[in-house]
Image: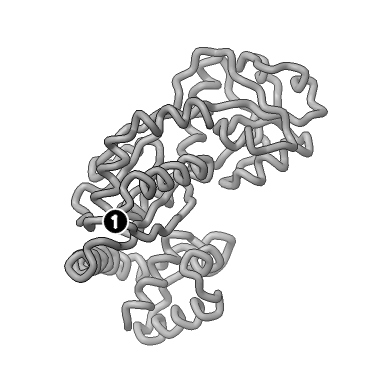
Amino acid sequence: MNLQQLTYFCAIEQRKSFTRASEQLRVTQSTLSHSINELERELNAPLFNRSGRVITLTPFGEILLEYVKPALSLLNDAQSKLKDMTDPESGVISLSYFSSLNDLVTYAISCYYADFGRIQPHFRFFPSSTTEIEESIANGTSDFAFTTEIANPNFEYHPIGYHETVIIVSDQHPLARYQAIHLSQLRSEKIITYESSCQIRGYIDRIMHSAGFAPKVIFETTSDNIIVSSVSANFGIALIPKPLGKQASSVKMLRILDDIPPRSIALAWRKSRYLSRAAESFSNYIIKNSAKLDEYLKTEM
């Protein structure tokens, strides 16, 4: 049993897929499978249920994970501390975020480099779903996340701004002649939406219920691209974050006329996590310049 095998094991458990884990780790799927097979042979126990689309842990895997996750988290902290001692002007900062926040993350980092150039860390990016973001913060894979607030007492949050939600329809859809509509006009529409593991799904359900109806969901996914392409093919309509609507040239974006609560965006991190000098510098910069980022959200996204 070695550190690489345990890192691979946790990545597969987090991503629920050998394919997605290999992409995250930047190794071939055959390398990943071989490493896990060797680990299972050494432990004389199967760690994953491999039947079906989603990979899950066996009871043996659940026991191993209980001990491995905190151990890897402590090792990550130790590595960060040693890096600070040997090279305090650099470092690696890992960020998780929703894909709809790509532009915000890029803008924040470009401003940080321009305004705080003495410390030049490298950044590692993990576009993720809500569940994956929470897991990556909890296990130490990510130092920070740009996300909506997650109900986790072990996390710290600093609010940055708000995310507008819009409606997208096909150019051929009857609603495409409007620039803005009320949610009640979607009462009889077929809805393409996110799976329940995505934080935005609960938000969409709540605002539709507040408009007096339950959405007629015909299709669920975690993929922004699948939602946009399905709407473009006129299979149904969808509610998505405004930045994704602006980027999707194949659909018509409609504003929502109802007075609905915006989705808050925050910088999140684990309370007990050791922050390297570079990571602390970055978080302090984001907190100090949150008004600047909020203005970017309002005007550019």
Return the x and y of residue 223 as percentages of the image width and height.
60, 47
Colour mapping used in the image: one colour
The relative height of residue 69 versus residue 156 in the rendered view (above or below) is: below
Q: Which one is in front, 218 or 281?
A: 281
Q: Quadrant of residue 178?
A: top right
Return the x and y of residue 229 as percentages of the image width and height.
72, 42
Amino acid on which the number 1 mark rests in the picture: Ile
Q: Give the total of numbered labels.
A: 1
Specify whether residue 180 is in view.
yes
The relative height of residue 137 versus residue 67 in the rendered view (above or below) is: above
Specify whether residue 190 is in view.
no
- Residue under the point 22% across and 63% down: 88
Q: Quadrant of residue 191?
A: top right
The relative height of residue 221 versus residue 178 in the rendered view (above or below) is: below
Return the x and y of residue 215 as percentages of the image width and height.
61, 26
- Looking at the rendered structure, the secondary structure element under dot 1 is loop
The relative height of residue 65 versus residue 290 in the rendered view (above or below) is: below
Residue topped by disc 1:
119
- Residue under the point 36% across and 36% down: 266
Return the x and y of residue 61 as percentages of the image width and height.
37, 69
- Residue under the point 49% across and 76% down: 32
Q: Which one is in front, 99 or 20?
A: 99
Q: Which one is in front, 138 or 46?
A: 138
Tell me the crowding category of disc 1: few under 14, some 14 to 19, or many 20 or more residues within 10 angstroms, Cα based.
some
Query: Quarter holding the N terminus?
Result: bottom left
**Left or right: residue 11 compared with residue 167:** left
- Residue under the point 38% across and 31% down: 292
Residue most toward the right?
172
